[in-house]
């Protein structure tokens, strides 16, 4: 019985701050406590983690378990910490060897049968882990996002048992190889398809060439949105850093990433009757 530390990352908008999952397993009245500003989903991990460990054929310690999610002042949301907590408990109880766990970051929600489920926001976390010089264990369902990294830096894990075998180096997981991405996005609307509207098309060409803003005004049905969609085809594809940022936003919102749209500039067409809050977003911003 002792102390173990597993690295993972929280989600705070576009940022993925590092979180240290500090697990202490000690003698005393059996209990399981999670501290460090966890919200309800994180506190519920006690039952998910315990059941997943038992159903994976591993031994859950009958002891006083305290898990601290550091830094304590950072709000912790979601089930992304499950895998890190489970591995931390097993290492602290000396049920498994630490291996190279100190060089890994772990993300993933645990099912009751021990399977590792998909989470949102994997790509921003992986970009931050790569900058820190560490690799990561990610759910296999997030492989498409992890393959966007130009340098392999993530292992796809399907279950807690597979993660344990990798940590103990008894059965190593394979790195997720980068996917081959198109140099230009496919299926972009072409301005050549527009019949007439010569003045509007010339305005689009000038705006694209000079990097200017453009505003179309007119009644519904005159082709304003149709013309605006063609502006994407006139502009160069996104540079890779900006394309990764767009993909990271998709990862945060849970959208399925389409490799065919790689480097394609995003387009939004809000309804003319939407409110200002619906257009720019509402709610409260978390202050750091």
Image (cartoon, rainbow, N blue to C red):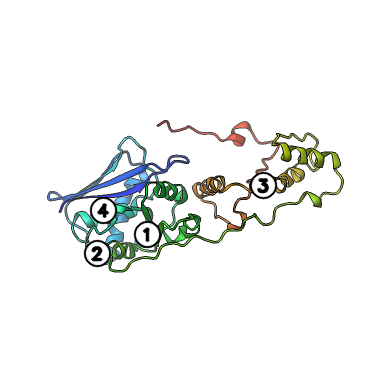
Q: Which residue is drawn at 67% across and 47% down?
A: 236
Near-viewer residue (130 or 69): 130
Residue 275, compared with residue 86, is above or below; it is: above
Q: Where is residue 281 in the image (x, y as percent from the top left)?
A: 56, 35
- State whether residue 80 appears in this view: yes
Q: Where is residue 110 in the image (x, y as percent from the top left)?
A: 36, 57
Q: Is mark 4 on a helix, strand or loop?
A: helix
Q: Which residue lies furthest to the left in this view?
A: 27
Q: How far apart are marks 2 and 4 (CA)?
A: 13 Å
Crowding at dot 4, Cα within 10 Å, few <14 / some 14-19 / many 20+, comes out as many
Q: Distance between the residues labelled 2 and 3?
A: 53 Å
| Residues marked 2 and 1 touching at CB (< 8 Å) | no
Q: Residue 58 carries which label?
A: 2
Q: Is mark 2 on a helix, strand or loop?
A: loop
Q: Which residue is drawn at 72% across and 46% down?
A: 234
- Judging by the rendered image, the residue that carries numbered circle 1 is 111
Q: Earlier in the sequence, mark 3 or mark 1?
A: 1
| Residues marked 2 and 4 touching at CB (< 8 Å) | no
Q: Which of marks 2 and 4 is nearer the N terminus?
A: 2
Q: Which residue lies furthest to the bottom in this view?
A: 171
- Residue mark closest to the camera, 2 vs 4: 4
Crowding at dot 3, Cα within 10 Å, few <14 / some 14-19 / many 20+, comes out as few
Q: How far apart are marks 3 and 4 (CA)?
A: 47 Å
- Residue mark closest to the camera, 3 vs 4: 3
| Residues marked 3 and 1 touching at CB (< 8 Å) | no
């Amino acid at each position: 019985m002792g102390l173990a530390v597993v690295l993972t990352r929280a989600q705070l908008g576009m940022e993925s701050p590092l979180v240290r999952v500090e697990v202490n397993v000690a003698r005393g009245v059996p209990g399981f406590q999670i501290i460090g500003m966890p919200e309800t989903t994180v506190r519920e991990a006690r039952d998910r983690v315990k059941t997943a460990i038992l159903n994976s054929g591993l031994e859950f310690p009958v002891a006083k378990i305290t898990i601290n999610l550091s830094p304590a002042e950072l709000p912790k949301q979601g089930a992304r910490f499950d895998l890190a907590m489970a591995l931390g408990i097993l290492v602290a109880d000396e049920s498994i060897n630490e291996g190279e766990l100190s060089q890994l970051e772990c993300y993933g929600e645990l099912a009751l049968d021990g399977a590792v489920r998909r989470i949102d926001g994997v790509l921003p976390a992986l970009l931050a882990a790569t900058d820190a010089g560490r690799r990561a264990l990610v759910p296999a369902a997030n492989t498409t996002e992890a393959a966007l990294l130009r340098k392999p830096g993530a292992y796809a894990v399907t279950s807690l048992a597979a993660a344990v075998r990798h940590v103990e180096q008894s059965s190593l997981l394979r790195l997720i190889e980068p996917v081959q991405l198109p140099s230009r996005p496919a299926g972009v609307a072409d301005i050549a398809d527009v019949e007439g509207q010569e003045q509007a098309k010339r305005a689009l060409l000038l705006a694209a060439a000079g990097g200017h803003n453009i505003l179309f005004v007119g009644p519904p049905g005159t082709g304003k949105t149709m013309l605006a969609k063609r502006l994407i085809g006139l502009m160069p594809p996104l540079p890779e850093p900006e394309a990764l940022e767009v993909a990271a936003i998709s990862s945060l919102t849970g959208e399925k990433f389409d490799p065919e749209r790689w480097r394609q500039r995003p387009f939004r067409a809000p309804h003319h009757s939407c409110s200002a809050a619906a257009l720019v977003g509402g709610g409260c911003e978390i202050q750091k």
